[in-house]
Every structure is written in C-alpha cells, then in structure tokens.
C-alpha cells in the first residue's frame, strides 16, 4: 500500500489528528505485516508542523519519521513564508510544488487523504 496525506492547516488540532491517524494506520498495517509507504505533504498554513523548534509535536513527527514516514514540504510555501530549510527537521524533503506532487502520486495509484 502507498498513502499520501495532504495537510494545509496550521491548527494544532488538525495536525494532531493527522499524526494520530498516521500512527493508527501504521499500527494496523504492522499488526497485519502489510507493507506500507506513507508520505505527508505539507503546504499552506501547515508549515509550522515541520519546524525543528517552536512546534508542540516534535516528538510525534520524529517518531513517525522513525517509522519510515516521509515528510515533504512545498518549495512555494518555503518561499512564501521566507523559511529556510535549516529551520525544519533535518529529514524534511522539499518538493517544487506540493499540488503537483499530490497529482503525480494519485496518478501513480497512491491513496490520497486530505487532512
């Protein structure tokens, strides 16, 4: 299975809910010994989710990364917010345009979840 999550909300409750959903999905597939690839595409107001400092859920994001979840951020979001990659967790990957990445993943057959 391959799943891509999209989040644009900077609201803590939305981010916490998504992180919990991903954890539950990984637990479910782990119990069934099912292979899964998970990506989280962050853009818009959700950029704060990936800040290395100053975010309330760094341990949850880091733990999910430790379970092979890929976290990606939109270059357009970085440009628009005047953020440097160095301000983010070191494992965050940058995609040129989040929306294009999401379209590509869906075209490749990935399940799509909007949070």
Image (spheres, rainbow, N blue to C red):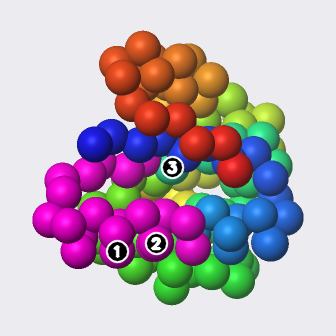
Q: What element carries label 2?
A: helix
Q: Is 21 situated above or below 45?
A: below
Task: Give the extent of the magenta segment.
Answer: 20-39
Residue 82 position in % (x across, y down): 76, 44
Mark nearest the camera among 1 and 3 is: 1
Q: What distance separates the C-alpha of mark 1 from that of mark 3?
A: 17 Å
Residue identified by numbered label 2: 24
Residue 20 is situated, as x and y percent measured from the top left of the image, at 57, 73
Residue at 14% over, 65% down: 33
Q: Along the line of sight, which residue is nearer the eye, 2 or 8?
A: 2
Check disc 3 and report its element: helix, strand or loop: strand
Q: Residue at position x 63%, y 81% from top?
A: 57
Disc marking residue 40: 3
107 left or right, relative to 11: left
**Cα distance between the residues tagged 2 and 3:** 15 Å
Q: What element carries label 1?
A: helix
**Is 78 displayed left or right of 67 in the figure?**
right
105 on left or right of 20: left
Which numbered marker is on residue 103? none
User: Where residue 62 sits: x, y (%)?
Assistant: 43, 76
How would you rate the neighbour count of disc 3 (Cα within 10 Å): few for under 14, some for 14-19, many for 20 or more? many
* Front-most of residues 6 and 49: 6
Local packing at callout 2 (Cα closer than 10 Å; few below 14, some 14-19, many 20+) is: few
Tell me where residue 79 appears, x and y as whole percent: 71, 35
Which image quarter: residue 77? Answer: top right
Residue 87 visible: no
Residue 1 visible within the image: yes
Q: Residue 27 carries which label?
A: 1
Q: Are marks 1 and 2 in contact (CB under 8 Å)?
A: yes
């Amino acid at each position: 299975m391959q799943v891509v999550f999209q989040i644009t909300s900077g609201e803590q409750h939305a981010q916490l809910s998504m992180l919990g959903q991903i954890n539950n999905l990984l637990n479910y597939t782990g119990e069934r010994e099912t292979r899964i690839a998970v990506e989280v595409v962050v853009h818009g107001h959700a950029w704060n989710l990936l800040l290395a400092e100053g975010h309330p859920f760094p341990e949850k994001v880091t733990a999910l990364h430790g379970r092979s979840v890929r976290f990606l951020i939109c270059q357009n979001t970085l440009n628009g917010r005047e953020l440097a990659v160095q301000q983010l967790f070191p494992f965050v990957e940058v995609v040129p345009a989040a929306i294009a990445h999401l379209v590509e993943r869906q075209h490749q057959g990935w399940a799509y979840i909007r949070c």
